[in-house]
Image: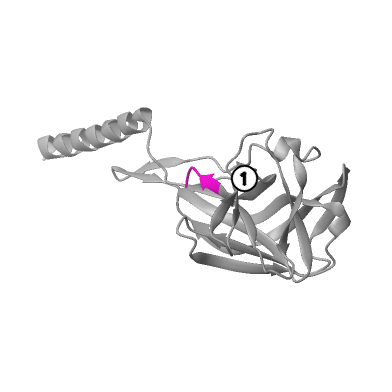
Amino acid sequence: MKYLHYAVAGGLLAAAPLVRADSALYISADYTHAATPALNAWCSSCDDLQIIGDRFTLDSSSALTSTDFAIKSNYGSQWQIHIGIYDTQLRLLALGTALPGSYSYLPIGNEVALVHAPLPAVTLAAGSYYIAWWDDHALGITGYTAGGSTSQYNFSQQKEIGGYGAAFRINGIHHTSAVPEPASYAMLLAALGLGLLVRLERRRQR
C-alpha cells in the first residue's frame, strides 16, 4: 500500500493521490460456499445462448483486473471464456475473452471448480454492476443459496433465476481521492502564519 504524504512548501499543501494495491473489490455472499452448490448448474451459452451472470457493487472508483468464479467441473472449459461487465440497465460496458492457458482451473470437490481469469481492462465508478461468464460450448455456472447473495441473472431472457446467487470474486485496484486530515490543515495554517510573521518582521526591519 502506498501511504499518503503531505508537503508544506511556500504555504501550499500538496496531497499525493492514494492508490491501494490489487485486492478483492467485491466478494459475493456465496463465494465461501463455493464447494457446496445448492443445485446442479445453469449452462452459460450452450445451444440456447443463455448468458448467466450476477450483480456486484463497488464502494469506490476501481480498476478491475481479474475474477474468480465457480463452475460445474464436469462441464470443463477448454474453450474461450467470455466475460462481460454490464450496468444495471444491462448495457455492455466491457467485454474480454480469456483464451485457454490464460486462466487457471482448480477443482475443489462436489463437481465444482474455481476459475481465475483476467477481466477486461475497465475502470468503474462506485455503484452496482453485473458480471457474466460464458463460453462457446457449455460453461456450467453453479447456483447457491447459503450466502443469500443476489440472484443470478439470465441475460438472454432478461430475468432473474430463482433467487440463486453465484460464487464469485472481483479483483482490482481501488482509486480514492486524497483528503487532508485535520492535523494536516493545522500544519498548513501554522506554515501560513509563520510565513506572515516572517514578512512582517522583514518589513519592520526596513
| Residue 85, quarter of the rendered image | bottom right
Q: Is residue 150 left or right of residue 13?
A: right
Which residue is depicted at the point 67% across and 55% down? Answer: 66
Front in this rendered view, residue 146 or 108: 146
Q: Is 140 within the magenta? A: no
Front in this rendered view, residue 180 or 116: 116
- List the residue tagged with mark 1: 162
Which residue is depicted at the point 67% across and 69% down? Answer: 49
| Residue 31, quarter of the rendered image | top right
Point out residue 15 in the picture as x, y percentages from the top left corner: 40, 45
Task: For residue 62, say whether it is visible.
Answer: no
Q: Is 59 within the magenta? A: yes
Front in this rendered view, residue 55 or 47: 47
Look at the image and tell me in which quarter the C terminus lies.
top left
Give the magenta-colored segment's residue range.
56-63
Q: Is residue 78 left or right of residue 55?
A: right
Asked which colour scheme the image uses, the reply is one colour
Q: Amino acid at mark 1?
A: Gly
| Residue 50, quarter of the rendered image | bottom right
